[in-house]
Image (cartoon, rainbow, N blue to C red):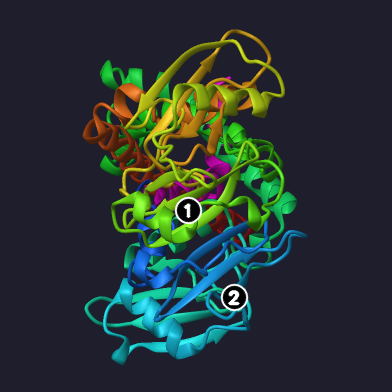
Amino acid sequence: MINAAFKVHRWTGIVFGLAAFLAFVSGLALHWHTYVFPTESEVVRGYGAPLSAAELGDALKVPASRQATLRHLNDRLVWEIEPTGGGALVLLDARTGAPIRAVSDSEASQIAARIGGDDRGAQTHLIAAHDHFYWLGKPPLPAYRVSFHEPRRLDVYVARATGNVTAVVGWRERITDILGEKTHYLKIGPLRTVTTPRFIIMGVLATAVLTGAISGLLYGIPQLFRRLSHTQRWGPWLRSIHNVVGAAVGLFIVMWGTSSYLMLWYPTMDPGAEERGRVSGEPLVGAEFRALPRAAVAAARAPVFALRATRLLDRPVYAAIHGDGGATLIDGRSGAVLSPVSDSLVRAIVDRYLGSRAPVRRITYLSGYDEYYHATLDGRGYSFDGNLRPLPVYRVDLEGGTDPSPLYIRADRGELVGRVGADYRAFRWLGSGVHDLNFPALFQRRPRLWNVAIVVPVLMGMLASATGVWLGATYAARAARARGWMRTAQ
């Protein structure tokens, strides 16, 4: 049994070791990965100056649409609307109602400069296809890529149709995307957009690494005990290091390799468009907004950079968006301030989402993250799968049943932003928890210890796989030379 494991481990170790080394290197890059998606505050910063009640006047009305956002496009006041029939977003001049066909390159430079620096030294390129960094989540095209070199190297992407900031790419995003996202998930070339072949290759590689780890443990642990008992002389120092480190790393590889199959599954806790539509209701009718935009901006008190007219439970509402991305929710009929949304409104949102009266066990106001609703530690507010996790939220726990629980509702806007079904619950603890070690006791309460718990095994894995590749390659070279010598002798 031990000899069979040794043969499997040795003769397949070069390929398996190389795959494991790349997985560990890319995993380390993913640990510090930062998504290129802009934060809510960066999007708002791109709008320009805040709205003032005086500039809006009494003539400005909400246009008929699914959703309409009043904001600045540099010096112009515009409506960004989602048409009632669906389709791409459209810009309208808020004063004349004339459509704005496209944002110019100079306007895009001004917008991007609020994120990146001095627009006088910027280089602006119009791109019609997704590039190496601008592709995740299928961002809008065409778009301007505005490149800055001062005060730091930064690329800011601005959608040509709307003038919205859609991506921010700095040195950290570049490095962790190339070494992490692309390498770890094989999102390279044609595989980037073709899911099934990529998952098959990743599954094969995970099986290969797992096979190498199991065979190494079956052979290496008895061998290690014999060496430690001094019944056998220690071999060359490189082999000794490989055996000692490999015994510990092999256990982690088995754990990570097994959980990686579940990581290919990766269900989401984010509600889809249909689920969000249940909560909002029918498309807008502009005449329903008896409270004017001017009154809504005045009612919000804090500076308002965008005023979004939308629906909540069929009720017309304004979301007055502030500089940090937070919002004040305002009733579109009475002008009353609704945020933070009340307990009764939270219950009504849950009932509408589920389609029946829900047995609510507990409603908790969260100003920080919990075991399901959490984000990476880079401070940008995105989850490990690149979905925005705004705060604060209400966590709604339901009584036992088949309905998703808990549900997460944004406290300032009343939007459903998360729901935990049985599939995500299983994935969270058996997949993500085991693979990323992001259990609350480590990830949330002791983030420095979590970093150590991830980085140390990864570094050990890099050492074990690198030494294994070297030992396997030298053994194969010696075996080839020996066979060549024997053939010559015959």
Question: In the image, is residue 167 above or below residue 116?
Answer: above
Q: Of the two numbered discs 1 and 2 on the same chain, state the one appearing first in sequence.
A: 2
Residue farthest along the right direction in this orientation: 85
Give the position of the N terminus as an image quadrant.
top right
Left or right side of 442 for 393: right
Residue at image point 52% right, 59% down: 182
Return the x and y of residue 403 as percentages of the image width and height.
Answer: 66, 18
Residue 29 in the magenta stretch? The answer is: yes
For label 1, count other residues whose C-alpha is less than 10 Å away and answer few (under 14), some (14-19) or many (20+): some
Magenta stretch: helix, strand or loop mostly: helix
Amino acid identity at mark 2: Leu
Question: In the image, is residue 359 above or below residue 293?
Answer: above
Return the x and y of residue 122 as percentages of the image width and height.
Answer: 35, 88
Q: Which residue is mark 2?
A: 92
Left or right side of 48 for 275: right
For label 2, count other residues whose C-alpha is less than 10 Å away and answer few (under 14), some (14-19) or many (20+): some
Secondary-structure class at tag 1:
helix
Distance (Cα) linking label 1 and label 2: 65 Å
Q: Nearer the viewer, residue 144 or 230?
A: 144
Check residue 425 in the rendering and tell me which mark sits there, or answer none. Answer: none
Question: In the image, is residue 167 above or below residue 301?
Answer: below
Check residue 473 in the rendering and tell me which mark sits there, or answer none. Answer: 1
Residue at image point 47% right, 41% down: 413
Question: In the image, is residue 88 above or below residue 435?
Answer: below
Return the x and y of residue 210 as percentages of the image width and height.
Answer: 56, 34
Amino acid identity at mark 1: Ala
Magenta stretch in the rendered image: 1-30
Give the position of the C terminus as an image quadrant.
bottom right
Residue 25 in the magenta stretch? The answer is: yes
Q: Nearer the viewer, residue 2 or 348?
A: 348
